[in-house]
Image: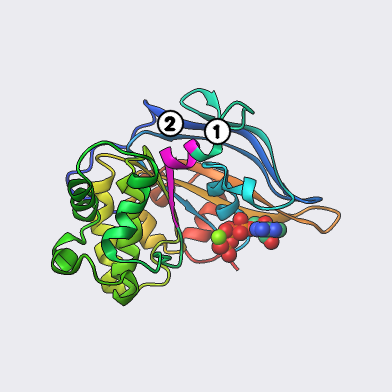
Amino acid sequence: MSLFSRRPGRPEASLDDPVFHLSDLDVWYGDHQAVRDVTMTIGRRQITAMIGPSGCGKSTVIRCLNRMNDLIPGARVVGKVSYHGENLYDPEVDPIEVRRRIGMVFQKPNPFPKSVYDNVAYGPRVNGMKGKLDDIVEEALTGAALWDEVKDNLKGSALALSGGQQQRLCIARAIAVRPEVVLMDEPCSALDPIATAKIEDLMAGLASEFTIVIVTHNMQQAARISDYTAFFTSDIDPAGVRHGRLVEYDATEKIFENPVDQRTEDYITGRFG
Ligand SMILES: Nc1ncnc2c1ncn2[C@@H]1O[C@H](COP(=O)(O)OP(=O)(O)OP(=O)(O)O)[C@@H](O)[C@H]1O
Ligand SMILES: [Mg+2]
């Protein structure tokens, strides 16, 4: 039985309009090469899932897409990450602007200890965005499928929301600055199945406007929501050092129904040790 079931109404998966191109990407932490040889293209308004066993480098690779690894002492990126054909790591590129255009949502919801309104308004204020702030906040909360639940208590503390609501608030905060890309590293792993389903429902809508890259441990989730899937694994070199690598990258349907590599097949069918 195939895990894959494409959401009704989703357009065909396509890489015709690339946003990122990673070529021969290696990432080091100090003298440990954590990930090697990643080459892949990420398409505009596609949902790209990264899957694979713990430690294979998914977080490391997703962090390369908005230069979050810059913030980790000792982290070094070798190879090329291009964003709309430009080298994302060019010294001329401003990492702050990069992170405005390429937002991120983390595993654990991390709202600021402020009101719901101020969480969402924070980025637009800092960025001096034009437009009425109330409208920007409403639009972002609506986009994150949270508006109806919070509209009567926008001045209430974000910390009083449930975990699932907090995560949707973090999504609202990320999209409020109108990024092009939203990166999500296991956004549902701290949530119950109902909150997870809400976020999955919301993803398809977000993908009509944003390019989404999501790391997930949940293969059904990758199969349900993504257009393209990258399967990573790690192997041990002759010196006994573990390195992550990209094994296979293709349309999600292909990865789940007809993978080329035996390691992908073993992982998606649960035979991976
Ligand atoms: N900040 C860091 N400093 C040093 N090494 C790190 C750091 N972050 C990750 N690593 C190493 O890089 C490798 C890949 O880790 P990474 O967190 O990217 O894996 P992952 O696929 O996201 O795993 P998980 O599914 O458990 O989140 C591991 O060997 C890990 O120990
Ligand atoms: Mg991770």
- Looking at the image, residue 258 sits to the left or right of residue 163; the answer is right
| Residue reaching furthest to the top | 85
- Which residue type does callout 1 highlight? Asp
Whether residue 55 is visible here, answered yes or no, is: yes
The residue that disc 2 covers is 19
Q: Is residue 100 magenta?
A: yes
At which x and y percent is residue 65? 52, 41
Quarter of the N terminus within the rendering: bottom left
Query: Ligand 1 is located in which of the four quadrants?
Result: bottom right
Of the two numbered discs 1 and 2 on the same chain, state the one appearing first in sequence: 2
Quarter of the C terminus within the rendering: bottom right
The residue that disc 1 covers is 94
Magenta segment range?
A: 97-105
Whether residue 224 is visible here, answered yes or no, is: no
Residue lying at 30% horizontally and 47% vertically, measured from the top left? 176
Residue lying at 57% horizontally and 48% vertically, measured from the top left? 68
Residue 116, placed above or below residue 123: below
Residue 143, placed above or below residue 26: below
- Tell us which disc is closer to us: 1 or 2: 1
At which x and y percent is residue 39? 58, 35
* Distance CA(mark 1)–CA(mark 2): 18 Å
Indicate how the structure is coloured in the image.
Answer: rainbow
Which element carries disc 1, helix, strand or loop?
loop
Closer to the camera in the image, 148 or 8: 148
